[in-house]
Amino acid sequence: MSDTAFNPVSSLRNLGPAMDEACARAGIHSAEQLRALGTDKAYARLLQNGTRPHFIGYYVLEMALQERPWNDCKGEEKKALRKRFDAIKASSFDPGLSEFEKMMNQIGLPPSC
């Protein structure tokens, strides 16, 4: 197994302890797991596990996985990332779900019939 499998998420550029905690809640415990998931799948998991959607957080994660400065995202690339973010956000929330059902889904109980 590679040494990177044990690196915390915060070992990636731009990411800190708050991202370590958010990722742990989503079952992502290392930088290697985060890389393997990729930005879109990882961010969807974060949202499904209580992280509030925020575009800056999404593109900071994308830049971290590309090993680029967080503010390097500009122009058409940023517009394309915004579309991806909006799609992930829309697919991660069901406005028809009650608060109780959302809590049950977060703790791993099957959705109601």
Image (tube, rainbow, N blue to C red):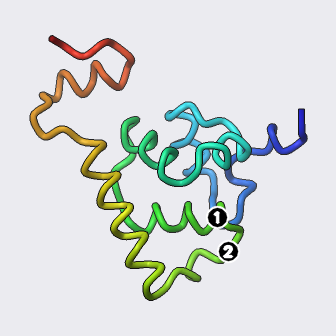
- Answer above or below: position of 18 versus 78: above
Determine the CA span between mark 2 and mark 1: 6 Å
Residue at x-position 71% and y-position 58%: 12
Q: Seen in the image, is 104 located left or right of residue 94?
A: right
Residue beneath label 2, please? 68
Q: Quadrant of residue 49?
A: top left
Say which quadrant the N terminus sits in. Answer: top right
In the drawing, what numbered circle is on residue 89?
none
Q: Of the residues shown, which amino acid type is indicated by label 2?
A: Arg
Q: Tell me where residue 80 appears, x and y as whole percent.
A: 40, 73
Q: Residues within 10 Å of mark 2 (few under 14, many from 20)?
A: some
Q: Quadrant of residue 61?
A: bottom right
Residue beneath label 1, please? 64
- Answer above or below: position of 54 versus 78: above
Say which quadrant the C terminus sits in. Answer: top left
Question: Which residue is most to the bottom?
Answer: 75
Looking at the image, which is closer to me, 98 or 113? 113
Q: Tell me where residue 105 appears, x and y as whole percent.
A: 31, 22
Badges 2 and 1: C-beta atoms under 8 Å apart? yes
